[in-house]
Image (cartoon, rainbow, N blue to C red):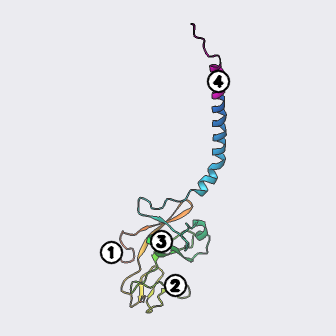
Amino acid sequence: MEKSLPLESPSMSRRQLLNFLTGAAVAATAGAALYPAGKFFVPPQEVGEDGSIVAKDINGNPIPARQILDSPPGTRALVAGLAGEPTYLTVQEDGTLHPWGIVDNCTHLGCTFPWNPNDNQFQCPCHGSRYDKEGRVVRGPAPLPLRLAHVSVVGDYIRISPWTDIDPRTGKKPWWV
Ligand code: FES
């Protein structure tokens, strides 16, 4: 018996092709429309290859860089940095961030401390140590300068990475490395 060719096949194929093309066009349009929203909602990479992390707020949410960069020059913004340690970021006169952050951990016995804008110092309330704006000891009993961390703005966020280079304040290997 002679086999008849299925008459439906060619038209089904055309329909499938049309469906595919239509679907692809819809997907491409939707993708293009959603790209900016998707980009906005993609969370920043947690730990970078350089050991960096994204600066976060007290609730553990990434802080948009704009939020800090829009602050007046001289602002010391406290963020959660490496290992969640509070770290001061400084807004410079030109509106950029100072390339090093200062870890809010007194080198005497580990208290946290505020920035005193009137004296232009970090002043530890526990035993009176004072540090200049770059974290050098101005008055003891703190024995060592404050730890540093690298700070950079990458895309919409601020990244903080370990400081293992020469300490620019002493010209020597950092004491914490
Ligand atoms: S812990 Fe800061 S001065 Fe003692």
Decide: few, some or many residues near mark 2? Use Cα within 10 Å; few <14, some 14-19, many ≥20.
Answer: some
User: Is 9 within the magenta?
Assistant: yes
Mark nearer the viewer, 3 or 1: 3
- Give the image location of residue 127, x and y in percent: 43, 92
Give the residue type at disc 1.
Lys
Q: Find the distance from the CA under tag 4 to the CA under tag 2.
A: 73 Å
Amino acid type of the residue tagged 2 in the rendering: Pro
Q: What is the tally of numbered marks visible in this picture?
A: 4
* Sequence-first tag of 2 and 1: 2
Q: Residues within 10 Å of mark 3 (few under 14, many from 20)?
A: many
Image height check: is 30 above or below 56?
A: above
Q: Is 67 on the left or on the right of 81, as rendered? A: right
Marks 4 and 2, the one that precedes in the sequence? 4
Instruction: Name the amino acid, label 4.
Output: Met
Marks 3/1: CA–CA distance: 23 Å
User: Residue 114 — which label?
Assistant: 2
Residue for badge 1: 172
Considering the numbered disc 4 on the image, is that residue within a helix, a strand or a loop? Answer: helix
Residue 9, position in %: x, y?
62, 20
Give the magenta-colored segment's residue range: 1-17
Q: Which residue is mark 3?
A: 81
Q: Nearer the viewer, mark 2 or mark 3?
A: 3
Query: Does dot 1 land on a helix, a strand or a loop?
Result: loop
> Label 4, on which residue?
12
